[in-house]
Image: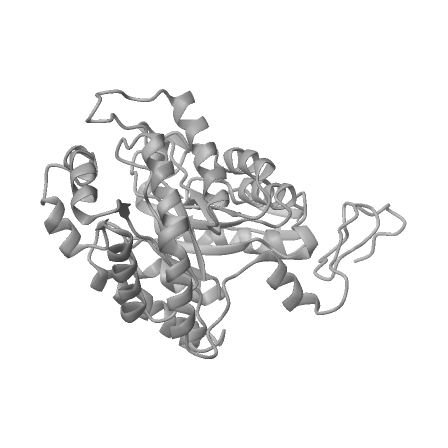
Amino acid sequence: MQFGLMSVSDVTRDPTTTATPSEAERIKSMVRIGVAAEEAGLDVFAVGEHHNPPFVSSSPTTLLAHIAAMTERIILSTSTTLITTNDPVRIAEEYAMLQHLADGRMDLMLGRGNTGPVYPWFGQNGAQSLQLALENYNLLHELWRKDVVDWEGSFRTPLQGFTSTPRPLDGVAPFVWHGSIRTPEIAEQAAFYGNGYFANHIFWPTHHFKRLIDFYRQRFEHYGHGTRKQAIVGLGGQTFIAKTSQEAHAQFRPYFNEAPVYGHGPTLEEFENSTPLTVGSPQEVIDKTLTFREHFGDYQRQLFLIDHAGLPEKTVLEQIELLGNEVVPTLRKELDARREDGVADAPTHAGRVAAQYGDAAPREFRPGANRGDNLVGPSPYLEPETAAV
């Protein structure tokens, strides 16, 4: 079981001080938060991709590569990478580069995004978001698994004899999660490829996400990737922790009340009762998080959203310390004790390399030297006299 943080990278005014951080301050703060997550013993740090204010993470690979250079163990991921408005070739190359720089400590979550205006900014039509998501991932999947790709679709120019570089580390494509908030089509896509499915699990009631996860598990089994309980599931969640419930509510309430996403609507208590949001003591956070397994079954990754709504960095770092020291150790122990036999392990690069190669040495791609197990057609890396069809 992996535990970690997911950030949406919002730059939001602190309602208690009226101060708003600059973009530069927020970016450097996110780096420190990612490093602190590793120091606190967490397993994953994920950041979303956005191209509109008030968000700043328009280039997740750049941010995550910087954090990778400052850490040794934590997995760097996204929440999400836009499969609709990004060119699949750029995704293939940028995330393969991140995979090399992080020594495999990375994966990514693909999604359509929830900001309509972003589509024309990148020359796309938002009304075709589902078709874009399906076609673009089909190409990305090919690019990471074949050294030479011939491909033709509806949304970009054809590719003939194309090789994306660098090739995936050890010949193993980065692990892909497909993330969604409301629609089953992305769960279907994840199941078809045997990839992971990440339920956002914030803002909406748990029963809504249960329907999506149950559907994904059923379709995962249908496509022959394993049993329903072997499907790879990740969950989001929101939390604010203090030593007591009273302290937690008093400290978080002004941020909740003014938050652009859920402020000025239901009360904090109403929102807690109807969504996965947990505001309280470490034990209260533990107790509510354990109920997630009761609803969804055993799962592999739990990410918490805590650096948002204008919370100052000092408070976020305190939250990380409480999460790492007083919440996650108990959750690990309790969830491991309740775990059924036969459930898939959380995905890691090392585990996937071992599954593909066993005791054999993994592939090291050398341009001009090796053709690769998945080579299709003449390789642009081989000299003309040695290239073969």
Say if residue 4 shows up in the picture. yes
Q: Residue 255 falls in which quadrant of the image?
A: top left
Q: Position of residue 229 (x, y in %)?
A: 41, 75
Residue 2 position within the rendered picture, expressed as x and y whole percent measured from the top left: 46, 58
- Residue at 50% x, 73% y is 225
Q: Tell me where residue 52 appears, x and y as whole percent.
A: 34, 29
Q: Relative to 41, is 112 on the left or the right?
A: left
User: Which quadrant does the N terminus fall into?
Assistant: bottom left
Look at the picture and state if 333 lies above or below 327: below
Q: Quadrant of residue 208?
A: bottom left
Q: Residue at x 11, y 49 (%)?
A: 269
In the picture provided, is 139 more to the left or to the right than 386? left
Of 313 and 115, nearer the camera is: 313
Residue positioned 38% across, 35% down in the render: 50
Q: Is residue 256 visible?
A: no
Looking at the picture, how far across and down is residue 276, in whole percent? 23, 55
Residue at the front extreme of this rendering: 243
* Vertical comparison of 318 with 373: above or below: above
87 and 71: which is toward the camera: 71
Query: Residue drawn at (32%, 34%), measured in percent from left and top?
Result: 315
With 80 as the anchor, is 53 left or right in this view? Answer: left
